Amino acid sequence: MKALVLDAEWSPRTEYVPTERERREQRAENASLIYRQPTLRLADLPTPTAGPGEVLIEVKACGVCGSDLHMIEQLPDGYMSSADPANLPVALGHEFSGVVVEVGPGVETLAAGTRVAVEGSQWCGACLPCRAGVFGQCSNLNEHGFSVNGAFADYVVTKPQYCWPIDALVEQFGEDAAFEAGALVEPFSVIYNALFVRAGGFLPGGHVAVFGAGPIGLIAVILARFAGAGTIVALDTVQERRDLALQMGADAALDPVALARDGQDAAAAIRELTGGMGAALAVESAGAGARTFPVIERSMALGGKIVQVGVGAGQAPLTLITLQTTNINLYGSMGSSGSGIFAAVIRLMAGGRVPVLPLITARFPLERVMDAFDRTAERRDGKVMVRA
Ligand SMILES: [Zn+2]
Ligand SMILES: [Zn+2]
């Protein structure tokens, strides 16, 4: 089978001592500390089979994510730029759907022929965080496309507990498009987790500001609109993404860099657009806290919530007295494990009221997955989708 395989050289930084597990499994908890010189190739691999407790999925659609780009980007010193876990070589791809084509011994909850969306994160269910119900913080977390093979491939092996049937999406969108919607369940779930599970949502009529209108920010606009936001303001430096934000339901889309160039302040613009009130919820989906937080902290309504969902290394400035005087809350959100989020997102999409497929702005066959990565790296699209 064809698969997009990432490899790199195992060479822990001199100042970093790998953990016992990292050495035993040759698995980095943070790729940028251990792996250097990443290389990417479309390889011919043996088609896998489903072992005990596993299922084999024939992949139908897999979205390209910003995290995939981080996996192939290098820091100036040659180390991988990704701070995600990595066990290389690995087939990339973690936002996917497909058809179960084989069930291994002992699998009783999923039958061959079932069309499914698959969770990217594999929580173990046995460690203390899992037993406490915080699956995203699993001590043994594995992730498709990072530490176990992912779905820029013809086939992928997973476990039934990470699979969610998408029959309802087939009814709403038809068979072929249902697989594309199915591949969007993962990124929708990431933002569902951030907005509604981690931050606990906002009251209808509250204003929402979205910092960074890449695919995750665009989905934040979609879900905030559907959840009854008053005014939604999106911010991005790329014109195409501001246009997409307006299409997905934002009321205004600002270019913070252009505003600053003209001597204007993005926070003041947000306050003006929200009638002086500010944002009940701010979503940081840029992963650029050093630049976004100075604006965010001055854009908030009293008692507002900030949720960090963009992934970026480094520190962000925060004026702590502002948290105190305005009763602001700050939440960190990672992934989408637990809380039945995949099922909720599938129901939401199947209801037919939220825009789903318009988020996809480019499609490539698996043979052209490298082109799909190049296209994503231009950072002008909504979601770039790789199709079987
Ligand atoms: Zn992703
Ligand atoms: Zn666990």
Image (cartoon, rainbow, N blue to C red):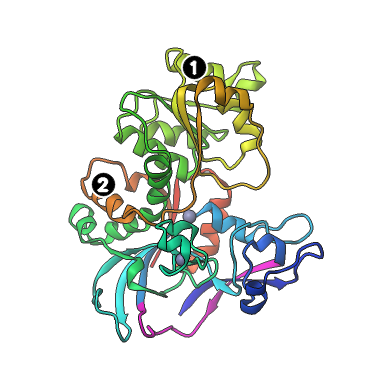
What residue is at 54 percent from the left and 60 percent from the top?
Answer: 371
Residue sticking out furthest to the left:
171
Quadrant placement of the C terminus: bottom left
Q: From mark 2 to mark 1, how far is it between C-alphas?
A: 31 Å
What residue is disc 1 on?
Answer: 271
- 88 part of magenta stretch: no
Residue 11 at x, y percent in the picture: 75, 71
Q: Amino acid at mark 1?
A: Arg
What residue is disc 2 on?
Answer: 348
Residue 276 at x, y percent in the picture: 46, 13
* Nearest the eye: 109 or 36: 109
Residue 94 at x, y percent in the picture: 46, 62
Q: Amino acid at mark 2?
A: Leu
User: Callout 2 environment at 10 Å: few (<14), some (14 to 19), or many (20+)?
Assistant: some
Residue 219 at x, y percent in the picture: 40, 42
- 39 part of magenta stretch: yes
What residue is at 25 percent from the left and 61 percent from the top?
Answer: 166
Quadrant placement of the N terminus: bottom left
Q: Is residue 276 above or below residue 226?
A: above
Relative to 61, is 71 on the left or the right?
Answer: right
- Tag 2–tag 1 contact (CB < 8 Å): no
Label 1 secondary element: helix
Disc nearer the start of the sequence (2/1) = 1
Label 2 secondary element: helix
Q: Which residues are magenta?
A: 36-55
* Nearest the eye: 164 or 200: 200
Beta carbon at label 1 within 8 Å of ligand 1: no
